Each structure stands twice: as C-alpha cells, then as structure tokens.
Amino acid sequence: PVARLWPQTERIKCAVLAALATRDDADRSDTYWTMAANGGRGLMKYFDTPVKGLWRDRLNPDGTFVEEAAPASSFYHIVCAIQELDQALAAIGHPG
C-alpha cells in the first residue's frame, strides 16, 4: 500500500499546529492552513465507502483501496484530527 488513513490525520494536525505557531507571519500561516485543507481533502477519499460512517485504511499504488474491515484504531486518529482543527479554529476566532 502507498498510503494509510492515519498519516493523513497526522498531516492535518501538524499543519494546523504550524499554522498557529506562525500566525504572526500571515503568508507562512496561510501556507500551513492550505496544507491542512489539502490534508482534509486527502482524508475525505478514505471516507468514500459503501457503508456511511465507515472508512478505508490502505490505499494501493493504483488508487484502489484494500478491501478489509475498517480498523477501530483509526477512529482515534480521526477524532484527534477533528479536535485539533476545532481547537485551532477557535483559537483564531473562526467558528468550527
């Protein structure tokens, strides 16, 4: 597999924290917010499943997903990314 779900959530979390850390430099901060948004778009493809509310975990090199059960451990990563984003948006005064 080329990509897994959980690193996508870490990508969002890192970009959000970098955006907050550089908020005194608008250009740098905007770059990190863009990276967070791109991470969110990348993560969304993992949620495109036949059963709403589930996710896929491993993306193959050809762009297809490994057919397997959704790992429960991924839920932790998903929730943490949402929480980090929500807290960061609140910190800059943006409604989440």
Image (cartoon, rainbow, N blue to C red):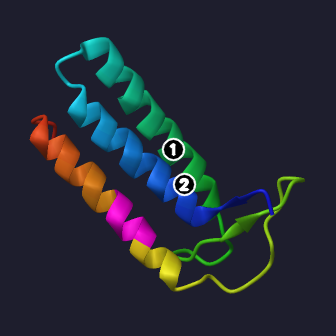
For badge 1, the amino acid type reads: Gly
Give the x, y percent position of residue 17: 29, 42
Rounded to the nearest angstrom, the CA distance separating label 2 from label 1 is 6 Å
Residue 29 highlighted magenta (yes or no): no
Kindly check if marks 2 and 1 are in contact, taking CB atoms under 8 A apart as contact.
yes
Tell me: 34 left or right of 4: left
Give the x, y percent position of residue 95: 16, 43
Q: Quadrant of residue 34?
A: top left
Q: Is residue 96 visible?
A: no
- Front residue of 92/25: it is 25
User: Which residue is located at x 23 percent, y 52 percent?
Assistant: 86
- Residue at image mark 1: 39
Of labels 2 and 1, earlier in sequence is 2
Tell me: 39 left or right of 4: left
* Magenta part of the chain: 77-81
- Residue at image mark 2: 8
User: Which residue is located at x 86 percent, y 54 percent?
Assistant: 61
For badge 2, the amino acid type reads: Gln
Tell me: 42 left or right of 59: left
SS class, disc 2: helix
User: Which residue is located at x 80 percent, y 73 percent?
Assistant: 66
